[in-house]
Amino acid sequence: MALSVFDIFKIGIGPSSSHTVGPMRAARNFARNLQDRQVLDKVARLSIHLYGSLAETGAGHRTDMGIMLGLMGEAPDTVDPAAISGLMDQVTQTGQLRLWHRHSIAFDPKTVFSGRVQPLPEHPNGMRFIALDAQGAPLLDERYVSIGGGFIRALDSIETDETVPEHEPMPYPFAHANELMAQCARHNLTIAQLMMANEATLRPTTEVRAGVLRIARVMDDAIDRGCGLQGSLPDAILPGGLKVKRRAPALYQELLSKSRSREPGSTRAPAPVNPDDVMFAMDWVNLYAMAVNEENAASGRVVTAPTNGASGLLPAVLRYYRTFIPGWSEDGVVDFLLTAAAIGFLYKENASISGAEVGCQGEVGVACSMAAGGLTAVMGGTVAQIENAAEIGMEHNLGLTCDPVGGLVQIPCIERNAMGGNKAINASRLAMHGNGTHHVTLDMVIETMRQTGADMKSQYKETSRGGLAVNVVEC
């Protein structure tokens, strides 16, 4: 296991980790390579080709925006979401783009970008960047694939952003769930303790803890912004042309009015109590998830968990823990996210977290599995119960298609996160009522998910050529 918790949980921008963040990182890598090879100042124009799912749904996922930001030198975790519109307008109005923030070239997105539905053989999300000099001679030609969750793989160069630093061997390596469980049993460790020990080979444990808590704060902030608790109220209509209305701000006010208890002086959503409605907690989980995914749809700041399309589910369950479970703690938050990351690793290494590769079972399904395991951990579940919860979370998402209407991460994605959040809580509760013994193991369900994704027709894998994407009339 060479992955880190900060690979699974990446701070970035919406609306898509595979179609926005991944292309942004690839374009940034390409621009930096131009700089490193000392040919940046010779670039006169660019030719950019998108393949497969990026060509088919890239417009709705703002792939062009991500690539242009990356070419400028912006990074997903540091770019100011409020500044993005101005940066895009500047390119449109001037017809110029500043490569790596220093070398201006003529840039018209209508002529620079071209799409090819036939994917590259390596992955459905392919890109090719070609830099040409004033005479039309190529200076650099590189291909990349965006493999889900903001991860990229360079086919013709070194991915400088993805390089794992030299480190001591991790003390508790694992590639499969049975190996993870065996390591925990052999060394009398929880999954979170094992993860922390492995992370300690990359950075001090104090930095790991601080970084994980920062991830949690970014998740919380996305909920608060989506509810209208930070700054001015967000735009009522989400961008993209479907005219989807934000529901989180109004739902927050409605639930607040029905709540019997508030946290004095807190800007966070209150600890709500409504004895007349036994399903009140479910409403809040729905709210938390939709608030984040509406922020994601508006290109706001979110965390891949493990993808942008599923970025609301895990924060919703984590906020559920902090809001509804007595005795929550920061230690619990850290344990929740470390446990969830370990489960995410298993899917990333043995199947996929790319909707273009395996459908939404690899996004919302994986997020549901991760959240179910994380919640079970902080509820005092055993390693066996955590594994059972994670398995339940995926077993009942098998076959989930990725069929976004208009290629936008809005319908059905926003509600799908809300449904998945409550499903994760139920998966945890089912597992906690048992002793961890069950027939279908987590390794079995991960392999089943991989096979199901391979068998799934391409029109149901983020191409917008099947399912809801063709049966819903765009407004």
Image (tube, rainbow, N blue to C red):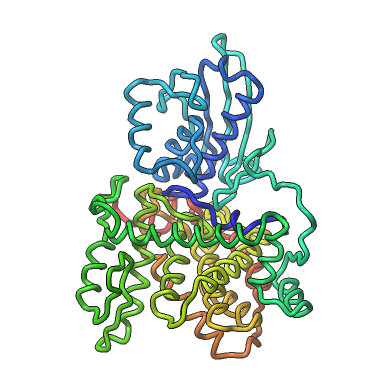
Please state which of residues 314 and 206 is positioned toward the viewer in this rendering: 206
- At which x and y percent is residue 217? 45, 60
User: What residue is rendered at 68% in x and 61% in y?
Assistant: 350
Please state which of residues 472 and 204 is positioned toward the viewer in this rendering: 204
- At which x and y percent is residue 307? 51, 56
On screen, residue 87 versus residue 102, left or right, reads left
On screen, residue 457 versus residue 471, left or right, reads right
Q: Is residue 420 visible?
A: no
Relative height, residue 325 to residue 170 (above, below): below
Relative height, residue 16 to residue 192 (above, below): above
User: What residue is rendered at 34% in x and 56% in y?
Assistant: 294
How many marks overall? 0
User: What residue is rendered at 47% in x and 60% in y?
Assistant: 310
Q: In which quarter of the image is residue 82?
A: top left
Q: Is residue 70 visible?
A: yes
Please state which of residues 131 and 49 is positioned toward the viewer in this rendering: 131
- At which x and y percent is residue 55? 48, 39
Relative height, residue 443 to residue 37 (above, below): below
On screen, residue 107 versus residue 141, left or right, reads left
User: What residue is rendered at 57% in x and 53% in y?
Assistant: 357
